[in-house]
Amino acid sequence: MSTSEQIKILCVKLNISVSELARLYGSSPQAFSQKMKREGFTPAELKKVAAAAGCEYSASFILPNGDTITD
């Protein structure tokens, strides 16, 4: 699933619009929408999106032996 799809689902579950999330994030809805179209979010930006939505974002690699690498 793409990042933009995940963000759309997040908004549905939180009962807010993507435009509202953009404003909470500190961006214009237009700029946020362009980032979504380009799939242009860095892990740091996704953490900021999560914080704006009042949730947490975690990205990690899980190795076959169970070890994880997180940022």
Image (cartoon, rainbow, N blue to C red):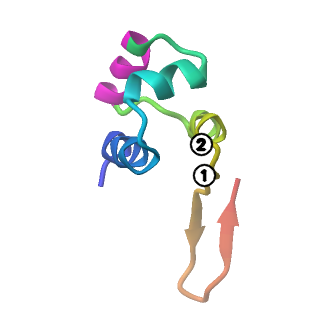
Q: Is residue 55 above or below residue 26?
A: below
The residue carrying mark 2 is 50
Answer with left or right where residue 5 lies relative to residue 48.
left
Pointer 2 with pointer 1, Cβ within 8 A: yes
Say whether residue 30 is visible. Answer: yes
Q: Residues within 10 Å of mark 1 (few under 14, many from 20)?
A: few
Say whether residue 35 is visible. Answer: no
Secondary structure, mark 2, is helix
Residue 22 shown in magenta: no
The one of 52 and 61 positioned closer to us in this rendering = 52
Q: Residue at 42% across / 29% down in the picture?
A: 40
Answer with left or right where residue 41 lies relative to residue 63.
left
Answer with left or right where residue 42 lies relative to residue 36.
right
Residue 32, image quadrant: top left
Q: Residue at 66% across / 40% down in the picture?
A: 51
Question: Looking at the picture, how far across and down is residue 54, in whole percent?
Answer: 64, 44
Three-letter amino acid code at disc 1?
Tyr
Answer with left or right where residue 18 lies relative to residue 50.
left
- Magenta range is 30-38
Residue 60, image quadrant: bottom right
